[in-house]
Amino acid sequence: MKSLKLVLIILLIVICVALTIIILFQEGKQNGLGSLSGQQFDSYWSRNKGRSREGLLVKLTSVCVILFFVLSAVLNIGSF
């Protein structure tokens, strides 16, 4: 049981580091000064962002956050 707890703690640390790195690689969500005047730019880049590197980073962030919460809950159940 102690070896399983150790493996889960190491996995949690790896996920925390990965989550930090993934979040730092993401671009800012602000639109700049154009958002103050209500301008919306509908470009090719903004329409296909889900298939780009930014979309992949958003999906990886979601997966890492879910894994973080699940592992945190499992480690805090108290059965270890």
Image (cartoon, helix red, strand yellow):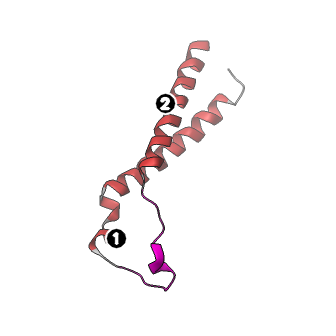
- Disc 2 to disc 1, how far (Cα)? 32 Å
> Is residue 1 at all visible to an observer of this figure?
no
| Amino acid type shown at disc 1 | Ser
Pinpoint residue 48: horizontal percent, then vertical percent.
Answer: 30, 67
Q: Residue at x 58, y 34 (%)?
A: 71
Q: Residue at x 47, y 64 (%)?
A: 29
| Amino acid type shown at disc 2 | Val
Predominant secondary structure in magenta? loop
Classify 76 as above or below 56. Answer: above
Q: Residue at x 27, y 73 (%)?
A: 44
Classify 55 as above or below 24. Answer: below
Classify 73 as above or below 32. Answer: above
Farthest residue to the top: give it.
2
Crowd band around label 2 with a 10 angstrom C-alpha radius: few (<14), some (14–19), many (20+): few
The residue where tag 1 is placed is: 46
The residue where tag 2 is placed is: 14
- Quarter of the figure that contains the N terminus: top right
Pinpoint residue 7: horizontal percent, then vertical percent.
Answer: 53, 20
- SS for tag 1? helix
Pinpoint residue 24: horizontal percent, then vertical percent.
Answer: 46, 48
- SS for tag 2? helix
Side of 44 where 38 appears, left or right: right
Classify 70 as above or below 58. Answer: above
Side of 27 where 47 appears, left or right: left
In-front residue for pair 26/50 = 26
Q: Specify start and end residues of the magenta stretch as a single range.
A: 27-41
Q: Residue at x 55, y 31 (%)?
A: 12
- Quarter of the figure that contains the C terminus: top right
Farthest residue to the right: give it.
78
